[in-house]
Amino acid sequence: MNDQQRTELEAAAFRRLLQHLDEHKEVQNIELMLVADFCRNCLSKWLGEEAGKRDLSLSDDDAREWVYGMPYSRWKSEFQQPATAEQLAAFEAKQQAKQGK
């Protein structure tokens, strides 16, 4: 496999991940963070960081729309559920554990 083929496979897998997340809007970002330590917002931030490394312009809003498949404000209003007290506590505990506290 050459570098171009590898890049194409990685891009296809990323597009499939975005499609999978789009097909499972019921999965909340807080749940992803608790289980996998990343969420849709992380993916959009990573896109923005990688664009910046390549001197490409990609706003936060555009990166989020790329990942969410719609404006973030629309996704939040239509699909985002409030995090429960238990989820927030688990998230905080996970963050503290990562910091070695």
Image (cartoon, rainbow, N blue to C red):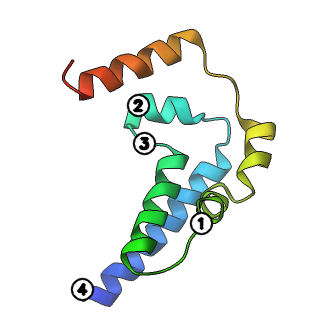
C-beta proximity under 8 Å, tags 4 and 3: no
Q: Gap between marks 1 and 3, in whole Å?
A: 20 Å
Sequence order check, earlier mark of 4 and 3: 4
Q: Position of residue 6 (x, y in %)?
A: 31, 80
**Which residue is more in the foreground, 27 or 33?**
33
Q: Gap between marks 2 and 4, in whole Å?
A: 32 Å
Q: Residues within 10 Å of mark 4 (few under 14, many from 20)?
A: few
Q: Position of residue 92 (x, y in %)?
A: 41, 19
Which quadrant of the structure image shows residue 71? bottom right
- Secondary structure under tag 3 reads loop
Per the rendering, the mark at residue 1 is 4
Sequence order check, earlier mark of 2 and 1: 2
| Quadrant location of the N terminus in the rendered image | bottom left
Sequence order check, earlier mark of 1 and 4: 4
Q: Residues within 10 Å of mark 1 (few under 14, many from 20)?
A: some
**Which residue is more in the foreground, 81 or 58?**
58
Q: Residue under label 3, please give it.
A: 38
C-beta proximity under 8 Å, tags 1 and 4: no
| Residue kind at label 2, given as amino acid type | Val
C-beta proximity under 8 Å, tags 2 and 1: no
Per the rendering, the mark at residue 35 is 2
